[in-house]
Amino acid sequence: MELTLSQCILTGLWTGLCITGMLTGTYLTRCLVMAAGVGIILGDVETGLMMGAVGELAFLGFGVSSGGSVPPNPVGPGIIGAVIAITMKGQGMDTKAALAYSFPFAVLIQFLITGIYTAATGILPWAEKAVDQGNYRRFRLLAHSTFIMFVSAGFFIGFTACYQTKNLEILISAIPSWMTEGLKTAGSLLPAVGFAVILNAMAGVDTMPFVLTGYILAAYMHMPVIGIALSAGAVVWLRFLPAGKKPGFGSGRTVTDYPEKSAGDGRGFGRIWPETLGPDTRLSSADRSPVSEKELRRISRRTALRAYLLQNGYNYGNYEGLAYANIMFPALKKLCKDQEEFRRELKDSLGYCSINPNFLPILTSFQIVALYQGIPAKDTRDIRLALMGPLAGIGDSMVQFCFAPVFSTIGASMAAEGMMTGPVVFLLGMNLLLFGLKLFNEALGYRLSMSFTDSLKDSLAPVSQGARMIGSAVIAGLVVQCITVQTAIEFSRGEETVFALQSFLDTLLPGILPIAFTGVLFYLLRVKKWSMYRLVGVTLGAGICLKLAGILA
């Protein structure tokens, strides 16, 4: 299939846009979304949707690193896999084989991403120097450096994948047919790796009954994913209700009774202090209130929505710290009295930060309220650091292990039927939900204010545990529904089949082979501490060898 230059450029631009979803949290970097876009650009929407559905399930659990390893990047199957599946469709290429062929590219792309994060570390000294010099325009540009590098890398990947399709065809056509058949079987097994990874992050003693429940509902009752999630949710509700553990918000303090004063000093800074007071003098909130409470709340909400920028400057030096300071930039400018205080507060916000973007508004609203009450960033740093770990865990379990699997599998199942609404439902569902979650967490952080630390743990711990339980049930059901593992072992007498193992298993323990294979991978990951790449290699090798040996159909 010949591709035009405009198709190559459009694919490059589409890849550059989608790969930034890793930073912005908009979930554009999902196989389901990327492959559908490639299908539209290359004129084969049906194959693009099918490739997106297959890749989405295979990479479902690859959004989270395990044991210090970095997962393969979904741009591999989402972009390159889709290009292979569409351009080589006439040579008999199907989506499962394209998925297997795309894995080496997924690994290489992740190494490229790691290189970008490493290179971005060198930007930190430049950003600090820009703050010292008062060159805030340069600082804000540097705070988006990782985003800019992602866009450039994405365009290069997408453009090259289309422009070099003939070389890809030559490379793949040199692979023997027995290897291709084996790779197709291996492609059917690969989703088990993603499920094992995500279960490793969720599974515990309290979630194992939900794993069993998910298997029973999917294998014996053929319940869809939404039904499994709702059933598990009802059980979680009943589990917490008798003990009085319904999620609540406690009785956090709020900022009230602040008199309105002048909102600016004519230089773009909010607070006006009496000139006789020193810069280190701490005033009461009533004496130093720079804005009204209504304006303060507006500032807090606007800052919460800037959480989409949290990873635009991600690096291996202070992780999300550079972008965090940029997120706080407008709020600090409103709340600081002069250039000196603004520069000091901005530098004190440049420290280490690592948190789920959807729970960042809890930290930003806390820092804003604290500064409003006369507590500088350096005095709240330890509290914010202490909250980052728990909030990151809660955010990952709630978003990555509960919301994303449900929406992605719903979208993938629709895409597998050739419905363009699959990627649309996924994107709209996830982004509307996460937008609301950001606003909810801003309100929570603002309300709890200075005394919210203990209340926060009491409020969100049941939510986190419930999310893991529901997610475990959903993943167990997905293993049964989405992984194809069938044995070809049978015993014959002459030309008559006496015993077919697959038929026996379908009657007694339906779906047990996908569960067993995923369980083996889970054991190797959890107990033996195997890396994700090792699991992928074993899965590919097992698929090829078992197919050649006639054990798998």
Image (tube, rainbow, N blue to C red):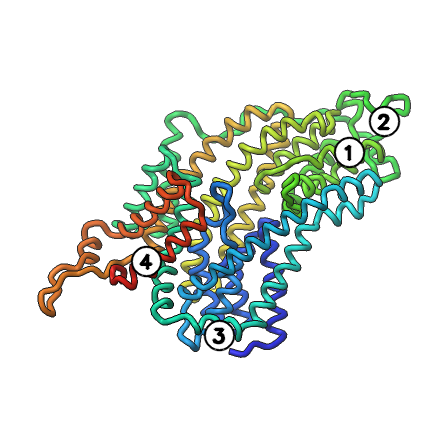
| 505 to the left or right of 343 | left
Q: Which mark is residue 170?
A: 3
Question: Which residue occupies 36% across, 48% down?
Answer: 227
> Which badge, 2 or 3, comes first in the chain's sequence?
3
Question: Which residue occupies 79% across, 32% down?
Answer: 344
Q: Which mark is residue 370?
A: none
Name the secondary structure under disc 1.
Answer: helix
Name the secondary structure under disc 4.
Answer: loop
Residue hosting label 2:
273
Q: Is residue 219 visible?
A: yes
Badge nearest the viewer, 2 or 3:
3
> Which badge, 2 or 4, comes first in the chain's sequence?
2
| 222 to the left or right of 534 | left
Residue hosting label 4:
484
Q: Amino acid at mark 1?
A: Leu
Relative to 339, does residue 197 appear above or below in the rendering? Answer: below
Question: Which residue occupies 41% across, 65% down?
Answer: 97
Mark 4, other Cα within 10 Å: few <14 / some 14–19 / many ≥20: many
